[in-house]
Image: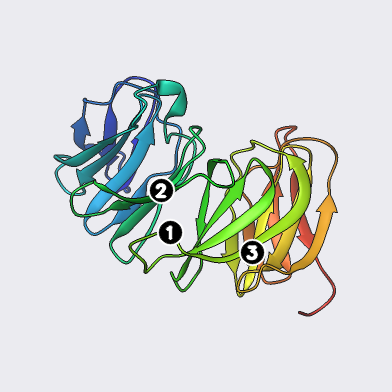
Amino acid sequence: MVFVGGSDGIFRALDIRHGEIIWEYAGVTGYVETKPLLYQNMVIFGAWDGRLYALEKNTGEPVWIWREPNKNPLYSPAACWPVAAFGKIFIASPDRFIRAIDAENGQTIWQDNRWKFRETVGLSENGLLVFGRSMTDSVIAFDTRRSAAQVVWAANFFYGYDIAPSMPVEKNGTLFWGTKNGWVFACNAVTGDLKWKFRYQNYLINTVTPVSANQVLFSNIDGDIICLSNKFKF
């Protein structure tokens, strides 16, 4: 099955072999930009209507719908790619909060805006940490197992003001992310210690695809596709 939303208010599940429609959900009232998340037999996605949807994977029936508290579409959790661990869905939205939402009922478990988050979240490969990137300089790692926001580490990387929806992605112990002004960063995912940083031109970096702890693929909005490799072993 392939899950996809668009700008027509319909979220669809397609047969991956033939492209035939398996089901449609026509209740979305905003543009779907995000990469959907599959978790606990649900497909989960945000839209530019202030909502986060959880649909039953095989039928498209709503399990729950979370609503942005300010009820302002500009604060929608629409650009972030939701992640999940230990029964929680993690999102960030332009109202400056990162949130943990109960996967069973769609209720908010905890929320945090101390670092002014916006649209980026990422999950460690072992599921123990959720990463949020602030609008100014910092990346913060929270413990995914807790029922309240518990910081494991917070680090300042001095990348300046940044609102690029470029998700932090871990590979083999290294956390990678890009920024709006061409920087790619790599840090230790467990401690937050910087490993290296590299600037490629001055264009927004899309969400990166790590190949290993020392190699990462990414594209920018100027249309380039880049493979960046660090010769050092960490």
Q: Along the polypeptide, which appears first: circle 1 or circle 3?
A: 1
Q: Residues within 10 Å of mark 2 (few under 14, many from 20)?
A: some
Tell me if 190 is positioned left or right of 67 in this view.
right
Residue 111 % position (x, y): 41, 48
> Looking at the picture, does residue 37 appear above or below residue 192?
above
The numbered mark, 2 or 3, whose residue comes first in the sequence reads 2
Q: Relative to 139, is 96 on the left or the right?
A: left
Residue 31 is marked as none
Circle 3: element type: strand
State whether residue 5 is above or below residue 209: above
CB atoms of marks 1 and 3 within 8 Å: no
Query: Picture coordinates of residue 205 (x, y %)?
Result: 70, 42
Gap in Å between the C-alphas at discs 2 and 3? 23 Å
Query: Label 1, on which residue?
Result: 149
Could you tell me which secondary element the residue under label 1 belongs to? loop
**Residue that mark 2 sits on:** 111
Q: What's the distance in space between the residues labelled 1 and 3, CA to CA? A: 20 Å
Mark 1 residue type: Ala
Q: Which x, y percent locates residue 177?
A: 66, 53
Q: Tell me the residue at 34%/23% (across/down).
A: 71
Relative to residue 111, is residue 195 drawn left or right?
right
Q: Amino acid at mark 2?
A: Gln
Q: Which residue is mark 3?
A: 175
Residue at left offset 64%, top offset 40%: 135
Mark 2–mark 1 CB contact (< 8 Å):
yes
**Which-is-in-front pick, marks 1 and 3?**
1
Q: Front-most of 61 and 224? A: 61
